[in-house]
């Protein structure tokens, strides 16, 4: 009877236009009123593909295929609301198989679901639709931030949304909005770097790109802000270990990118697996409800991270039983549990609902959010996925966008003795090092598999650095690996080969990894790679280092031996071409570091440090000596800054000041420069930072071209979080700084 009623609700909706005919709030309420405790608990459950596929959990038959009996159980008995990913330990899936999986889930759900509530599929499409074969793979987030080009980054997220929807999947667990303030952390490369302002700009365009003003169109998916809140700053540097972060610091540094994303209409959020100040975030009502819902006004779905409800018992030990853990997490504010390998969460939740241990109003609030999301996505009017709508999937056009982004991320950190660019027709070059001939080291984790290590899945036809360089001029390019990440290999052959060339390019790398498998005990570059560089230096030929790292590995010992250093981050499938084109000068690097590059293990100081961090042992203000500064990056041309002026020198409430500066390309080739505006608050009730980024603009210049760049600032741009946790701007003197130019203003 209930089924008939709901079916009649849904049948009255024609399937023709996905952008219309959503269910009304009343219709959603009617569905909820018909749902049993089992159906509600099921909606709040997310299982991994492994639970419904052929084979054992984490040991699936490859390629993955649905097991219809298991699927029937998941739907009919457990009423599951959501499924994720590709099965633990498994890899990427073809477009055709995705269509089969998604269409079958839909059909079976129609057949066995009592109320025919659609199942929502979610996936980690972290740097492109990385779990679909042949999808376009882009630079990882840290490289995206290094472009300082929000327009390009937005385009990348649009393409990722397109290719994720092309796979039949409407929900992307991206972007990571955690601030990259801890270089040791294994997920550093998944962040937009250390700076609040830059990360906020990137967060904004990421949400805009993924959702494209909605979540129901054929090229739109729901975003998921990860991982709320304070995940990226574990004290030990190890993933999911305790963070000690005060409420003030949480708000000053870690909250703004999430606030920005919520303002952009982000639909879902994933919770931090770790603990802050002794409380696992999954049970923290202050963060998950008071802050997220009441203060920030977030109305979407909050999903746990992987098995995090169970971890409250077996890792965090704040609950003695799983049942208690389920209750704690739900009462704190989670809506959906990424369970993900069994149905124990679902069964325990049913018990809790039936006993009345969790109020029905609390359960209904979560179920309503989940149904609202499905409704907004157009899932109640699901149409069979067809390839025809997506002619650009994995296309040359999309690859070009990935290439553009990779090129703009390339950050030239050193260039002496005309080491770069290399003249491809006149100079012979030896290319060596672990990242020289590996697509996996260019892509990092979340590439076809979780850890990104399985080369069998690599996209056919994509070029490593060596491939791309040989394509330019094979006869001038020699490749000998010389060293893997951890051990020297054919180093003598490498040295012999180096004797015959004009320049040596060493592509340094880091094993692709993320989360727990990415934990390290120190930031040093591996001995084998340093040995390779030191041995090659004995030949006294120009050495160029290309760095493809997950995080800034310490290169102090070898930076001085190198004539040039090109920092490439994890540039993705077009990274080989982008690196080659920058080395050969086809492209002019314009990336800027989105983090402070440490020179020493234990000097992990950020550019927006406090004055006390500048105080050196000799009492001079000189202790901040990073390998390379935040915002730093050279070009093959040079820029001069002059004539910084302000429209007035006093800033009042509701007022603005226009800042003007001239920038001239004084070199001989075209190039792009990022004009960065910083401020320095001279005195404040909370110790002020030495400087903070407040605006930037990336512009292209022809040789000899001068541009006047304008920024308009308001009082709120100079704010900070005070002791009472309010965002305030205190009156007093401020310095405005662009490059070597500075002006003082007074704020009333
Ligand atoms: C990660 C998340 C990811 C989830 C699903 C977790 O282990 O922390 O970022 O979205 O797995 O794969």
Image (cartoon, rainbow, N blue to C red):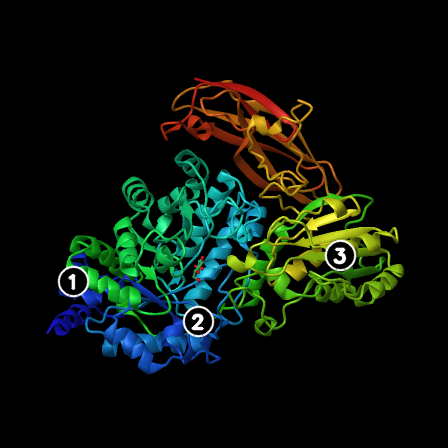
Q: Is mark 2 within 8 Å of ligand 1?
A: no
Asked whether 320 or 210 is in front, the reply is: 320
The answer to whether residue 483 is seen in the rendering is: yes
Residue drawn at x 39%, y 36% as measured from the top left: 247
**Front label number (1 vs 3):** 1
Label 1 vs label 2: CA separation?
32 Å
Describe the element under mark 2 as helix, strand or loop: loop
Quarter of the rendering occupied by the N terminus: bottom left
Q: Is residue 78 left or right of residue 602?
A: left
Q: Is mark 1 within 8 Å of ligand 1?
A: no
Tell me if mark 1 has few (under 14), some (14-19) or many (20+) residues whose alpha carbon lies within 10 angstroms of its own. some
Locate residue 652: give its quadrant: top left
Q: Residue furthest left?
A: 1
Residue drawn at x 31%, y 82% as measured from the top left: 69
**Front label number (3 vs 2):** 2
Quarter of the rendering occupied by the C terminus: top left
Q: Earlier in the sequence, mark 1 or mark 2?
A: 2
Residue 563, placed above or below residue 657: below
**Horizontal and vertical percent position of residue 417:** 83, 44
Q: Earlier in the sequence, mark 3 or mark 2?
A: 2
**Residue 320 numbered mark, or none:** none
Residue 197, placed above or below residue 13: above
**Residue 506 numbered mark, or none:** 3
**Horizontal and vertical percent position of residue 300:** 30, 52
Q: Which residue is mark 2?
A: 87
Describe the element under mark 1 as helix, strand or loop: helix
**Residue 354 numbered mark, or none:** 1
**Horizontal and vertical percent position of residue 19:** 30, 61
The answer to whether residue 27 is seen in the rendering is: no
């Amino acid at each position: 009877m209930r089924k008939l009623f709901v079916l009649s609700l849904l049948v009255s909706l024609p399937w023709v236009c996905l952008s219309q005919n959503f269910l009304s709030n009343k219709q959603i309420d009617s569905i909820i009123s018909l749902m049993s405790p089992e159906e509600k608990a099921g909606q709040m459950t997310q299982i991994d593909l492994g639970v419904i596929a052929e084979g054992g959990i984490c040991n699936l038959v490859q390629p993955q295929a649905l097991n219809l009996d298991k699927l029937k159980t998941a739907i009919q008995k457990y009423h599951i609301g959501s499924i994720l990913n590709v099965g633990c330990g498994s890899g990427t899936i073809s477009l055709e198989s995705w269509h089969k999986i998604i269409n079958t889930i839909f059909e079976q759900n129609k057949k066995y679901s009592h109320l025919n509530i659609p199942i929502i599929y979610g996936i980690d499409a972290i740097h492109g639709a990385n779990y679909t074969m042949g999808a376009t793979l882009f630079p990882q987030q840290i490289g995206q931030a290094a472009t300082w080009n929000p327009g390009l980054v937005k385009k990348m997220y649009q393409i990722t949304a397109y290719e994720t929807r092309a796979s039949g999947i409407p929900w992307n667990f991206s972007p990571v909005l955690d601030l990259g303030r801890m270089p040791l952390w294994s997920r550093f490369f998944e962040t937009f770097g250390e700076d609040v302002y830059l990360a906020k700009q990137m967060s904004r365009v990421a949400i805009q790109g993924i959702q494209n003003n909605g979540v129901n169109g054929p090229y739109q998916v729901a975003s998921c802000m990860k991982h709320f809140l304070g995940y990226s700053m574990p004290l030990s540097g190890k993933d999911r270990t305790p963070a000690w972060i005060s409420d003030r610091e949480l708000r000053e540094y870690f909250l703004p990118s999430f606030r920005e994303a919520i303002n952009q209409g982000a639909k879902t959020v994933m919770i931090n697996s770790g603990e802050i100040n002794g409380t696992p975030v999954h049970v923290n009502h202050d963060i998950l409800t008071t802050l997220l819902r009441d203060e920030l006004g977030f109305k979407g779905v909050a999903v746990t991270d992987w098995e995090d409800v169970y971890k409250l018992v077996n890792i965090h030990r704040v609950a003695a039983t799983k049942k208690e853990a389920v209750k704690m997490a739900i009462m704190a504010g989670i809506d959906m549990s990424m369970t993900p390998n069994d149905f124990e969460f679902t069964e325990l939740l049913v018990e809790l609902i039936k006993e009345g241990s969790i109020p029905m109003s609390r359960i209904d609030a979560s179920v309503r959010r989940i149904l609202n999301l499905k409704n907004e996505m157009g899932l109640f009017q699901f149409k069979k996925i067809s390839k025809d709508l997506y002619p650009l999937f994995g296309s040359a056009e999309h690859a070009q966008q990935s290439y553009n982004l990779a090129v703009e991320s390339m950050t030239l950190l050193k260039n002496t003795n005309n080491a770069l660019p290399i003249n491809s027709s006149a100079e012979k070059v030896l290319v060596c090092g672990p990242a020289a001939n590996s697509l996996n080291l260019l892509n990092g984790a979340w590439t076809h598999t979780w850890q990104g290590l399985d080369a069998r899945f690599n996209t056919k036809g994509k070029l490593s650095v060596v491939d791309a360089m040989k394509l330019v001029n094979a006869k001038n390019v020699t490749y000998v690996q010389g060293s893997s990440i951890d051990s020297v290999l054919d180093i003598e052959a490498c040295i012999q080969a180096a004797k015959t060339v004009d320049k040596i390019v060493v592509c340094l790398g880091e094993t692709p990894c993320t989360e727990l498998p990415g934990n390290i005990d120190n930031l040093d570059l591996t001995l084998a790679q340093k040995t390779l560089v030191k041995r090659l230096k004995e030949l006294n030929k120009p050495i160029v280092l290309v760095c493809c790292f997950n995080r800034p590995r310490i290169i102090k010992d070898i930076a001085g031996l190198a004539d040039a250093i090109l920092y490439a981050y994890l540039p993705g499938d077009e990274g080989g071409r982008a690196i080659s084109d920058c080395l050969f000068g086809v492209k002019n690097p314009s990336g800027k570091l989105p983090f402070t590059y440490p020179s020493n293990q234990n000097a992990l100081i950020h550019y927006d440090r406090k004055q006390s961090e500048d105080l050196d042992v000799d009492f001079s203000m000189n202790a901040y000596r990073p390998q390379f500064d935040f915002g730093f990056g050279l070009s093959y041309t040079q820029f001069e800054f002059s004539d910084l002026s302000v429209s007035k020198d006093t800033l009042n409430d509701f007022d603005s000041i226009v800042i003007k500066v001239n920038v001239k390309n004084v070199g001989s080739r075209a190039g792009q420069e990022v004009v960065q505006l910083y401020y320095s608050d001279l005195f404040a009730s909370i110790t002020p930072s030495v400087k903070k980024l407040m605006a930037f603009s990336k512009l292209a210049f022809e040789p000899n071209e001068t541009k006047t760049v304008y920024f308009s600032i308001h009082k709120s741009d100079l704010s900070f979080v005070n002791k009472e946790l309010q965002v305030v701007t205190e009156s007093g003197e401020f310095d405005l700084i662009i490059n070597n130019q500075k002006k003082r203003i007074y704020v009333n």
